[in-house]
Amino acid sequence: MLKEMYQQLKQKFSSESGGNEEPQQPDKSPASLSTERIKAVVAELNSASTTFSEAGFIMDQLDINIGLSSHIIPHFRQLKEISPEEQEQLLGQLEANSIIKFVLISLFKSSNMKSLLDNTDMFFHHVAIDISTAPSVCTVFKREYSVADQFENTRH
């Protein structure tokens, strides 16, 4: 969106200054998520709340970063664990190239990482999934006391 605005301003400046440049089209590269595409992804994430719930997760935060490389980052907390058989069944109900299938696979793999920190005072807190041209998954572990301290400070 910002890049499109920049291109429009550049085109307007060029035509006002007598430049004979060809009008430039907005960037359609994969790095540039259009407003329509962002709306579609957000709608798809919101409509999948029942699927996320069946998988044992809830989307509790959604970050949308707009820029030259836009990012949609849903954050999930795990409410319950489901069996590997239930995971496979749920994944089998989704389209092959669906964003929701990618999200669920990421959530299941991230929740399996809990065993890495079994003998520590860290626990599995949440998962943030960056949906962009270079998708990534961030599994967040926190110390129990840091979450309790934060809760005490923010409770009204």
Image: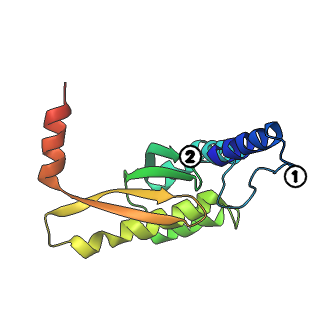
Marks 1 and 2 in Cβ contact (< 8 Å): no
Asked if 65 appears above or below 139 in the picture, the reply is above
- Front residue (pair 22, 42): 22
Q: Secondary structure at mark 2?
A: loop
Image: 10 above or below 103: above
Which residue is at the front of the view, 31 or 125? 31
Colouring of the image: rainbow
Residue type beneath disc 2: Ile
Determine crowd level at label 2: few under 14, some 14-19, many 20+ residues with C-alpha closer than 10 A.
some
Taking the spot 43% from the left edge, 62% from the top edge, the residue there is: 82
- Check disc 2 and report the residue beneath it: 66
Q: Position of residue 14 (x, y in %)?
A: 78, 44
Q: Is residue 78 left or right of residue 124?
A: right
Q: Which residue is mark 1?
A: 22
Taking the image as shown, residue 128 lies to the left or right of residue 65, namely: left
- Residue shown at the point (50%, 58%) measured from the top left: 130
Q: Earlier in the sequence, mark 1 or mark 2?
A: 1
- Tell me: residue 117, above or below residue 23: below
Q: In this orientation, which residue lies closer to the viewer: 57 or 80? A: 57
Q: Amino acid at mark 1?
A: Glu
Q: Residues within 10 Å of mark 1 (few under 14, many from 20)?
A: few
Depth-wise, is mark 1 or mark 2 nearer the camera? 1
